[in-house]
Image (cartoon, coloured by chain):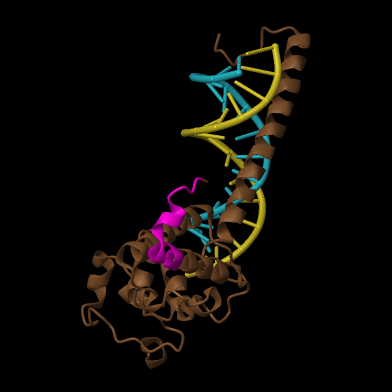
Chain colours: A brown, B cyan, C yellow
DNA sequence: TAGGCCATCTGGTCCT
DNA sequence: AGGACCAGATGGCCTA
């Protein structure tokens, strides 16, 4: 008899198992809802959002990973990446659909974000494209290291706005990045302030 | 229409 | 024993 074969079980035992299974199904449903809520929460911290279509679960996780990488690179190099560099980091490992969406939001050519194998299909493309003029010299572009120690938070909070879609439905991700930039600048000015930090 | 994504169910395993 | 977690199976929905 297979472990799951209940044909020899008494009706009372079968009923008991059914009840247990139904209860387990409910818990599993609730657990998955909790997982989905957490993913929804995570989506709010990712700088790329669209109004009509939300990122899939797997793409949310991939983009979150890439976003963390991008922020780490900014901290390590103490420089803001170009839009194309930023897009490259964010697009790492994403599906073609999401990559296209990303390219559209960041206003770079999608073909410049494709992996090398797909990039070969566009061999006539220049390796490093010119950014649109308004992206090459964005009005709010500012090097992190250029901020004076006495500059206020509000003045130093000039995130790379050209990284975000004008259709951005929520300012939350923008604000989150802005705050990270502030913390980065504070850290660079006085790392000792953060030495005792524990989450 | 095929493929991707999702919710749900299910049985197995591990832990308390 | 019962709950949490996991992975496989299944069917529905949507989009390119």
Name the image quarter holding residue C2: top right
Task: Give percent across and percent down for residue A132.
Answer: 37, 89
Query: Magenta segment, principal secondary structure?
Result: helix
Magenta-colored stretch includes residue A140: no
Please name the residue shown 36% across and 58% down the image. Answer: A93
Span highlighted in magenta in the image? A184-198
Residue A151 lies left or right of residue A10; in this view the side is left
A59 lies above or below A23? below
Image quarter of the N terminus of chain A:
top right
- In front of the other: A110 or A48: A48
Magenta-colored stretch includes residue A185: yes
Residue A47 visible, this angle:
no
A156 lies above or below A198? below
Q: Residue furthest bottom?
A: A133
Residue A90 lies left or right of residue A199; in this view the side is left
- In front of the other: A143 or A131: A143
B11 lies above or below A50? above
Task: Give percent across and percent down for residue A164.
Answer: 50, 76
Task: Give percent across and percent down for residue C9.
Answer: 53, 35
Number of numbered discs present?
0
Task: Give percent across and percent down for residue A90.
Answer: 40, 65
Please name the residue shown 40% across and 81% down the image. Answer: A142
Name the image quarter holding residue A108: bottom left
Please name the residue shown 52% across and 80% down the image. Answer: A155
Residue A113 lies left or right of residue A117; in this view the side is right
Name the image quarter holding residue A55: bottom right
Residue A157 visible, this angle:
yes
């Amino acid at each position: 008899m297979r472990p799951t074969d209940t044909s020899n079980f008494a009706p009372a035992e079968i009923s008991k198992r059914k009840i247990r299974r139904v209860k387990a199904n409910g818990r599993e449903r609730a657990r998955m809802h909790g997982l989905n809520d957490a993913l929804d929460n995570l989506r709010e911290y990712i700088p790329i959002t669209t109004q009509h279509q939300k990122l899939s679960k797997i793409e949310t996780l991939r983009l979150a990973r890439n976003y963390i990488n991008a922020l780490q690179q900014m901290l390590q190099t103490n420089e803001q990446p170009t839009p194309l560099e930023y897009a490259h980091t964010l697009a790492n490992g994403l599906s073609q659909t999401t990559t296209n969406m990303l390219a559209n939001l960041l206003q770079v050519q999608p073909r410049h974000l494709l992996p090398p194998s797909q990039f070969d299909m566009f061999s006539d493309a220049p390796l490093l494209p010119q950014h649109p003029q308004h992206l090459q010299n964005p009005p709010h572009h500012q090097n992190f290291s250029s901020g004076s120690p006495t500059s206020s938070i509000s003045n130093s909070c000039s995130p790379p706005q050209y990284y975000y879609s004008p259709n951005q439905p929520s300012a939350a991700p923008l604000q989150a990045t802005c705050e990270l930039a502030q913390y980065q600048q504070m850290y660079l000015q006085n790392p000792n302030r953060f030495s005792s930090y524990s989450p």
